[in-house]
Amino acid sequence: MNYESVMKLALERAFYFPSCEIYGDAQAGFWEYGPTGVSVKNKFLELWRRELVRRDRMLEIDGSQIMSKSVFEASGHLGNFADPIIKCKKCGLTFRADKLIAEIANVEIPESADLEDFDKMIQEKNIVCTKCKGEFDVAKKFNMMFRVGIGPEDVEAYLRPETCQSIFVDFPRLFKTMRGKLPLGIAQVGKSFRNEIAPRQSLLRLREFYQAEIEVFCNPGKLNELEKFSEIENTKLRIQISDGIQVMTCKEAVEKGVIPNKFVAYYLGLLTEFYEKTGIDMEKSRFRKLGEKEKAFYADVAFDFEVNTTIGWLELVACNYRSDYDLSSHAKMSKEKFEVMDNDDKVLPHVFEISMGIDRSLYTILEHSLREDKENERMVLSIKPYLAPTHVGVLSLVKKDGLAEKTDEVYRLIRTKFDSFLDHSGAIGRRYRRLDEIGAPFAITVDHQTKEDNTVTIRRRDDMAQDRVNISELETILAKETAYP
RNA sequence: GCAGUCAUAGUAUAGCCUGGUUAGUAUUCGGGGUUUCCAACCCUGUGACGCGGGUUCGAAUCCCGCUGACUGCACCA
């Protein structure tokens, strides 16, 4: 289904919608999740916990969103997370200073250079606005982090631009108190904040967004010694190589040198198995190795997990081998010791990161699950039952003859065990359609026969077929059908 | 951030050019009825001119600013 239809569904059924929408000064890049969206998000995260955190015995933390200045001095975000920009005095057009200079004067100035260097070069080479020939104002830094002031003294701090910094900062304590052993995964779900220049397309480019990040700390000397690699060695990865996507097992990818080591391949394998279970169409996915220029400033080797949608390839996960970039910078800045013992070796761990964009993942799940059933004139969200915002609708065929009361009874029986929705009003077909649209995989209908033999019908969303079962069996059936895989 | 297009109920739209009755329609939604297993029907009700200025006796309509959405460019660490 396309972006437009997903957007319509999102607005009509309260999956997500613009933040502060009743006010005229609402800013772009901020969206809220409604009840249905939250329900899917929570279930998606439960799946993530099962398939990655628990499976790999990772530790999950929940850190602060506001972090002190030193953290970002050490992480490099204060220096590198900013673009040098110049603005035309006449027409107001803004350019990236380094890019414009490289283009016009053919001189490479690193983007982290002093601002005066850009001004000097612009003077020297007499660079003017490409559009109106106007003069440029002095270069400025546009930092994508949101600055906040703490307390009455307005102490400088920042909203985190990625969740992982708390994981790095917390690593020494966690390793000691949780009896850590390399390789050790530490995970976190939470919000991050980036002052994007042009937020776009609802959940796909936000200023405030959810990440589920995993940082795996490892001994860099043992990247090919990983016993659990055998668990995923036959898992098939889809990897972009030059112009085509090649499908190969994790084992083959390492043997052919497509992936540098077993360690990285293991986590790409886990990630593949996870996304298969979200119901995203994996035939439309790929891992893409990033080139030198595309990589983040902290990354050594980087693979993006991307999925093709109706608005193009979307990056859902960034997998970065960050080496000891973060731990050594924080060690230097804080004087804290980050070396740990790995058997008899004292090592400064390296980090492999799996940084997942939750909002984009949810969008993709919706886009890949939503379909139009023309034959039956309905929109169906064929989402995996364990991710569905509502598991089951509980309906009375008619309100009268005591069926409503009987339906209430059935609802009370299951309401705390499943996400269920009670509905008596209107035609039965309409109620089924409403449930189809929010992806409820099952509908239970109480009819006249129920009063005679205590049976109800269960209707399945995808094929609209119905079975008659005893009320006493409902819990078992639903538990089985909505269970995580 | 730049350029173009646009902004009316939950959703989709008409009206705007040419200012003037109660802002129309479809669907959704609430209540009632009838029928009963796939958006039927009948009655009834709720619900909108993005925000701020200006012009005017009078603004959804004309003008200005802001905000947002879409598309393209740039950006995406």
Image (tube, rainbow, N blue to C red):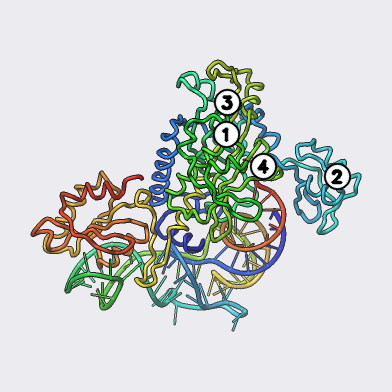
Q: State the separation of the CA atoms marked 4 and 3.
A: 23 Å
Quarter where residue A225 is shown: top right
Disc 1 is placed on an element classified as strand
Residue at position x 66%, y 36% in the image: A300
Disc 2 is placed on an element classified as loop
Q: Which comes before the other along the chain, label 4 or label 2?
A: 2
Residue hosting label 2: A107
Residue at position x 60%, y 18% in the image: A336
Q: Are marks 4 and 1 on the same chain?
A: yes
Q: Which comes before the other along the chain, label 2 or label 1?
A: 2
Residue at position x 52%, y 27% in the image: A183
Q: Which comes before the other along the chain, label 4 or label 3?
A: 3
Q: Is residue A101 left or right of residue A297?
A: right
Q: Nearer the viewer, residue B52 or A387?
A: A387
| Badge 3 density bin: few <14, some 14–19, many ≥20, Cα 10 Å | many
What kind of residue is marked 2? Val
- Residue A238 at x, y percent in the picture: 54, 50
| Badge 1 density bin: few <14, some 14–19, many ≥20, Cα 10 Å | many
| Badge 2 density bin: few <14, some 14–19, many ≥20, Cα 10 Å | some
Can you see residue A299? Answer: yes
Q: Which comes before the other along the chain, label 3 or label 2?
A: 2
